[in-house]
Image (cartoon, rainbow, N blue to C red):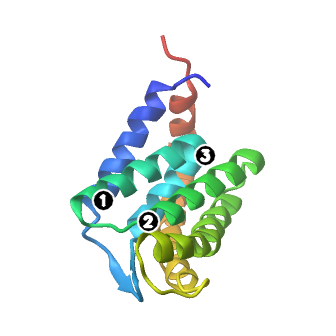
Amino acid sequence: MKINTKKVAASGMLVAVAVSLSSFSVPIGASKCFPVQHLCNVIAGVFLGPVYGVAMAFCTSWIRNLMGTGSLLAFPGSMVGAYLCGLLYQHTRKLTMAYIGEVLGTGILGGILCYPVATMLMGKEAALFAYVLPFLMSTACGTMIAAALVGALYRSGGFQYLNQMLEKKEN
């Protein structure tokens, strides 16, 4: 895989947005729900693809954990959501599929993957599906915001411009 400098830079900007807005979280149950992460996951999945989306989600989760504004539960949720969002969009080129990928990846799969993280790494008692509902609520909110933003970009012509700019060959 060849590294695309423009996509790396865009990933870094999304990490900066997500980290800088990490104070905007809503506690739901035992998790911190972070709709800005889901917004960035969708943007990364659609414009950058699954690999850069996962890298962006990992870096955001890592920095937030180092700063004390996140938890270990951010890793499985955000990374699976970004991957599935990017993968479904890459294969279908349908924005609806990207949104579904983020919600299913973060809300269902990520929520289930939090069980071993919570019980084995964090020492918490939890049920297998304990994180599914809070993650679904968070990702639904962030994905709706992303859908509104991407829709506005699409109607304005900015969507096509960004895709062309990120896919151009570098000198």
Q: Which residue is at a point 51% across and 77% down the rendered structure image? A: 135
Callout 3: SS? helix
Callout 2: SS? helix
State the image coordinates of residue 9 (x, y, percent, origin top left): 39, 34
Disc 1 to disc 2: CB gap under 8 Å = yes
Q: Which one is earlier in the sequence, the residue at label 1 or at label 3? A: 3
Q: Is residue 39 left or right of 132 when viewed as pictured?
A: left
Q: Find disc 3 in the rendering and name its residue.
A: 50
**Can the viewer see residue 142?**
yes
Amino acid of disc 1: Arg
Query: Which quadrant does the N terminus fall into?
Result: top right
125 vs 112: above or below: below
Q: Label 3 to label 2, Cα distance in Å? A: 17 Å
Q: Label 1 to label 2, Cα distance in Å? A: 9 Å
Q: Is residue 89 left or right of 73 when viewed as pictured?
A: right
Q: Find disc 1 in the rendering and name its residue.
A: 64
Q: Find disc 2 in the rendering and name its residue.
A: 74
Q: Which one is earlier in the sequence, the residue at label 3 or at label 2? A: 3
State the image coordinates of residue 30 (x, y, percent, origin top left): 40, 85
**Front tag of 1 and 3:** 1
Q: Label 1 to label 3, Cα distance in Å? A: 21 Å
